[in-house]
Image (cartoon, grey):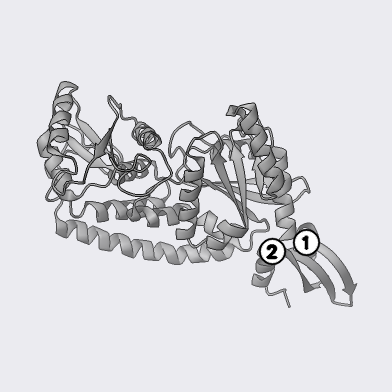
């Protein structure tokens, strides 16, 4: 595992400005590799005076790596940065080992973890777009192994024999399939508007504790390993709030820094619940030294998904893992939560502060309402009962046929009723 960092900026990695420490970037890259059960025998930070077009690294660095790759019998080298096809090919020739960059590693993880049909298609499309310039020229000598997209290779199995024409045909077919799925998704989105519960989505940097919080709140058993991308496909459960209101809580894939552009579409597939959610909860790892940098990465991805306003105005911020903090840091977080009505400090592991979060969700959904007038047939008891459960009835007048109600409802509930053509 090699993380390239410029010599001139100790706090930067891969040549781009960042508030994240170089050491934390390397640690995260090691976590990514271990997420697909790779054994990391060495992890190093390499300072670059400049990026070499042919090999990224200088000649001396390439030679030094060749020696320890040979001595340690390393079969795969992960470069935690972006490699051009030429750089990748030259490094493989010099080191006599397979070489993948950060994009290839993340694609491998997503290829192995994707479970839904749409998510699998989106990730395959991203992978083929990434491979198009690499498989023919650079990787024809590599061999496939189980899972993922074969970036890592495996001895004893069939050789990769994919040319540009076959890749292009597959990409075109995937795009057609995804267009059909998008049309179906639009119908599903319309159906979701009829669901009588608001949707609350958990988002956050990978390994921030979203699944642990999800399990704590819903008393479920969703996978919550201490591993990057432990959750890829979304999970939804009912959740009862202190007021008695019921919501649907959604656990989603974790975000990560420097997400490859090829994977934006894949994130759109797995984060559909976030796009359609009535309320978004940003779970942060308060114990992580780069928590602020992770926060910026999450808000950036939300912006890419078209959720700028949600990220700025309607987002609840959860500072998780306070059980790992010392007394001073916990006090500081508690003071921040007092000053910021949209912030909660808690521990998903112990349950401390989770009640406060539920109360905040309740208040948030209650305040995001406005008064409307409804005319509901008296014989439609189901709709009348639903309105009383989900809204605040301000007034009611009945005639021989209809109940004329003045009700305060959330925008989500208004949309559901509008779909049923009951709203004036």
Left or right position of 33 against 236: left
Labels 1 and 2 touching (C-beta < 8 A):
yes
Marked residue nearer the N-terminal end (1 or 2): 1
Q: Residue furthest front?
A: 8
The relative height of residue 173 versus residue 136 in the rendered view (above or below) is below
Tag 1 residue: 391
Using residue 36 as the reference point, say whether residue 73 is left or right of it: left
> How many numbered circles does the render carry?
2
Is disc 1 placed on a helix, strand or loop?
A: loop
| Rendered residue at 30%/39% (across/down) | 147
* 392 versus 52 height, above or below: below
Residue 400 in view here: yes
Estimate the x, y position of residue 255 in percent, counting from the top left.
45, 46
The residue at 74%/59% (across/down) is 367
Q: Front-most of 152 and 347?
A: 347
Position above or below: 410 against 96: below
Q: Quadrant of the N terminus?
A: top left
- List the residue tagged with mark 2: 413
Can residue 379 be seen?
no
Q: Secondary structure at mark 2?
A: helix
258 vs 224, left or right, is left
Relative height, residue 349 to residue 161 (above, below): above
Residue 294 numbered tag: none
Pointer 1: residues within 10 angstroms few (<14), some, or many (20+)? many
Cα distance in 3D space between marks 1 and 2: 8 Å
| The one of 254 and 43 positioned closer to us in this rendering | 43
Measuring 31% from the left and 59% from the top, which residue is drawn there? 174
């Amino acid at each position: 595992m090699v993380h390239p960092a410029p010599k001139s900026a100790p706090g930067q990695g891969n040549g781009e400005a960042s508030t994240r420490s170089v050491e934390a970037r390397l640690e995260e890259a090691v976590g990514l590799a271990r997420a697909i059960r790779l054994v990391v025998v060495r992890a190093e930070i390499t300072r670059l005076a400049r990026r070499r077009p042919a090999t990224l690294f200088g000649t001396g660095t390439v030679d030094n790596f060749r020696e320890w790759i040979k001595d340690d019998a390393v079969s795969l080298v992960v470069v935690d940065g972006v490699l051009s096809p030429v750089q990748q090919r030259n490094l493989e020739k010099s080191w006599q080992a397979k070489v993948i960059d950060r994009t290839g590693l993340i694609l491998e993880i997503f290829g192995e973890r994707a479970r839904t049909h749409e998510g699998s298609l989106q990730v395959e499309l991203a992978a083929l777009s990434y491979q198009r310039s690499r498989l023919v020229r650079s990787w024809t000598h590599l061999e496939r192994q189980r899972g993922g997209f074969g970036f890592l290779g495996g001895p004893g199995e069939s050789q990769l024999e994919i040319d540009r024409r076959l890749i292009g045909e597959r990409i075109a077919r995937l795009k057609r399939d995804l267009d059909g799925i998008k049309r179906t998704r639009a119908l599903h989105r319309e159906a979701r508007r009829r669901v009588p519960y608001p949707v609350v989505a958990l988002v956050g940097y990978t390994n921030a504790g979203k699944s642990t919080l999800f399990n704590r709140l819903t008393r479920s058993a969703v996978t919550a390993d201490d591993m990057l991308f432990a959750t890829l496909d979304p999970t939804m459960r009912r959740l009862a709030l202190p007021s008695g209101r019921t919501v649907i809580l959604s656990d989603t894939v974790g975000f990560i820094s420097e997400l490859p552009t090829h994977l934006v579409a894949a994130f759109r597939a797995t984060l559909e619940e976030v796009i359609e959610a009535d309320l978004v909860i940003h779970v942060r790892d308060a114990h992580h030294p780069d928590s602020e940098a992770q926060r910026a990465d999450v808000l950036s991805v939300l912006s890419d998904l078209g959720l700028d306003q949600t990220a700025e105005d309607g987002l609840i911020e959860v500072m998780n893992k306070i059980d790992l903090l010392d007394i001073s840091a916990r006090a500081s977080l508690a003071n921040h939560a007092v000053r910021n009505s949209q912030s909660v400090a808690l521990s998903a592991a112990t349950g401390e502060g989770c009640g406060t979060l539920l109360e905040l969700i309740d208040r948030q959904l209650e305040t995001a309402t406005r008064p409307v007038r409804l005319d509901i047939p008296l014989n439609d008891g189901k709709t009348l009962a639903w309105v009383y459960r989900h809204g605040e009835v301000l007034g009611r007048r009945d005639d021989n046929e209809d109940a004329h109600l003045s009700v305060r409802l959330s925008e989500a509930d208004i949309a559901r009723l509008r779909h049923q053509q009951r709203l004036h």
